Amino acid sequence: MTASRRASALPEVPTLDELGLKGFELTQWQAVVAPDGTPKPVVDLLYREVAKALKMPDVVERLATQGGNELVGNTPDEFAQVIKNDLVKYAKLIKAAKIQVQ
């Protein structure tokens, strides 16, 4: 498990941190996004409706069986910060590994 904590769908699978590989965290996310410049009332409406859907038992069950991801339901501002943090983390990793696009 590459996340910082065990997945509820796979509680018997230890994290890499638990196995001694400290500081390694790699998570995936899926999101509903809108183009830059989308009016705030539209973004807020999308957020409210998606957040509502993520509380529906059938939606929770379906998403859990499609990869075992934990459902988060971040606000638009919280998710924007996730993206910014990931960009910094992966840029650092790419530079350290000297990865180049050819």
Image (spheres, rainbow, N blue to C red):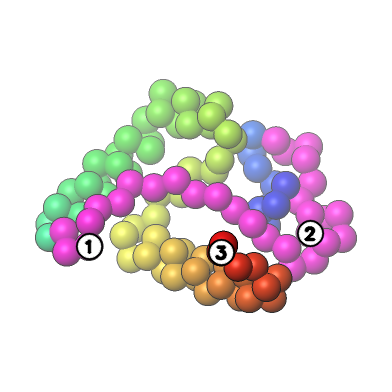
Q: Distance between the residues labelled 3 and 2?
A: 30 Å
Secondary structure beneath label 1: loop
Q: How far apart are marks 1 and 3 (CA)?
A: 26 Å
Q: Which of these two is toward me, 15 or 28?
A: 28
The residue under label 1 is 36
Q: How crowded is mark 2: few (under 14 residues within 10 Å), some or many (20 or more)?
A: some
**Would residue 57 be visible to someone looking at this image?**
no
Mark 2: which amino acid?
Asp
Residue 3 image offset from top left, x and y in percent: 66, 53
Relative to residue 35, is residue 68 depicted above or below?
Answer: above
Find residue 52 and report its image quarter: top left
The residue under label 2 is 17
Residue 44 image offset from top left, x and y in percent: 20, 55
Mark 3: which amino acid?
Val
- Name the disc covering residue 47, or none: none
**Would residue 39 be visible to someone looking at this image?**
yes
Q: Is 73 placed left or right of 40 in the picture? A: right
Residues rendered magenta in the picture = 10-38
